[in-house]
Image (cartoon, rainbow, N blue to C red):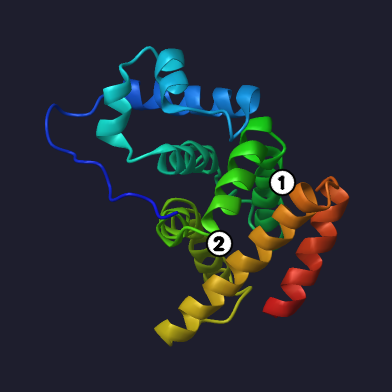
Amino acid sequence: MQSRSPASRTGRPRSAAADAAILAATRAALVELGWSKLTLGDVATRAGVAKTTLYRRWAGKNELVVDAVAELFDELELPDSGSLASDIEGVVLQFATILARPEAKSGLMAVVSEATRDDALRERIRASVVERQKRLVLEGRSRAQARGELPPEPDPESAARTADLIFDMVAGAVVHRTLVSAEPADEEWVRGFTRVLLQGLA
């Protein structure tokens, strides 16, 4: 099943408070009801808004849940600890902590599953989660290059491919560790993972 086209943005300006309440209500409903039983009507009731308010903002449940999950990952911040290893360890531990939250587990696993048969949803995940969080890789690499920890990459295409690979390695390893293997991404594991990643970057 394919996602519908984005909902219209005409009419009254959007309320940031209403958006925040809707996304928080979506995450709460995911934890309590699960993906299959979650409805926009239930989310609207929890958020204290009309159901039509949701449909003015989101085309359907898939899009709403992606945005609710994406907001969690916007909490990620890259530490500025003075070394690339410490910066990586800090952000990976943050990432693992977010994935340990019930609403992140439920939401991420649900939308990834749905995206296997919905190309439009897959693109929304890429835009709302992957591309937004790739900023951490770009920022971390820039700092490391300025400190002389990583060599410069003057070719833009090569630099973009490297950034994609770094993001895929970090996100893939942490998601597999925490959500697929159900093992903790604790400090010891993160230190070991960081050592392996840095060997590859060197």
| Residue 134 x, y percent position in the rendering | 50, 60
> Does the rendering let one see residue 173?
yes
| Quadrant housing residue 104 | top right
| Residue 172 x, y percent position in the rendering | 68, 62
Residue matched to label 1: 93
| Residue 68 x, y percent position in the rendering | 48, 36
Label 1 or label 2, whichever lies nearer to me, is: 1
**Disc 1 + disc 2, Cβ < 8 Å:** no
- The residue at the point 71 percent across, 45 percent down is 96
- The residue at the point 35 percent across, 27 percent down is 19
Q: Which quarter of the figure is the N terminus placed in?
A: bottom left
- Residue at the extreme front: 1
- The residue at the point 61 percent across, 67 percent down is 168
**Does label 1 or label 2 sit earlier along the sequence?**
1
Cα distance, mark 1 to mark 2? 15 Å
Residue matched to label 2: 140
Residue type (three-letter) at the residue carrying disc 1: Leu
| Quadrant housing residue 52 | top left
Q: How many marks?
A: 2
